[in-house]
Image (cartoon, helix red, strand yellow):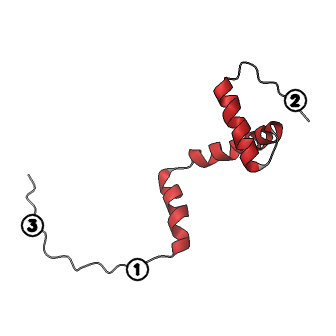
Amino acid sequence: MARIMIRKLEERVKAKLRMRAAHHGRSMEQEMREILKHAPIVEEQRAQNLADAIRRQIEPLGGVELSLPTRSHLHAVVK
């Protein structure tokens, strides 16, 4: 396993990490390990386009067939 040392971490960041770890019932080291383990997955999800993200959220709800009204004659002026 690799070792990583982080220097010059702001105290407020360290305090938030400590609170987050306590909330999850883990040590700070375990919490950092979980954060780092899931970071590539989060980046991968962000890289997908907006339409795919919306589709993933809506698909489980099922689809709806919409009936479109008949088009009337369109009057357009083309020059």
Q: Is residue 61 left or right of residue 70?
A: right
Which quadrant of the figure has residue 15?
top right
- Tell me: residue 19, above or below residue 60: above
Total marks placed? 3
Q: Earlier in the sequence, mark 1 or mark 2?
A: 2
For the residues labelled 3 and 1, say whether their Cβ atoms are less than 8 Å apart: no
Which quadrant of the figure has residue 60?
bottom right
Q: Is residue 66 left or right of residue 44?
A: left
Q: Label 3 belongs to which residue?
A: 75
Residue 41 image point, x, y percent: 69, 47
- Tell me: residue 24, above or below residue 55: above
Q: CA distance from mark 1 to mark 2?
A: 55 Å
- Label 1 sits on a secondary structure element that is loop
Pick the residue in front: 18 or 45: 18
- Label 2 sits on a secondary structure element that is loop
Q: Residues within 10 Å of mark 1 (few under 14, many from 20)?
A: few
Q: Label 1 belongs to which residue?
A: 65
Residue 4 image point, x, y percent: 83, 28
For image coordinates 88% across by 32% down, the residue present is: 2
Q: Quadrant of the N terminus?
A: top right
Q: Label 2 belongs to which residue?
A: 3
**Amino acid found under the numbered disc labelled 2:** Arg
- Label 3 sits on a secondary structure element that is loop
For image coordinates 53% across by 69% down, the residue present is: 59
Pick the residue in front: 10 or 43: 10
- Tell me: residue 50, above or below residue 2: below
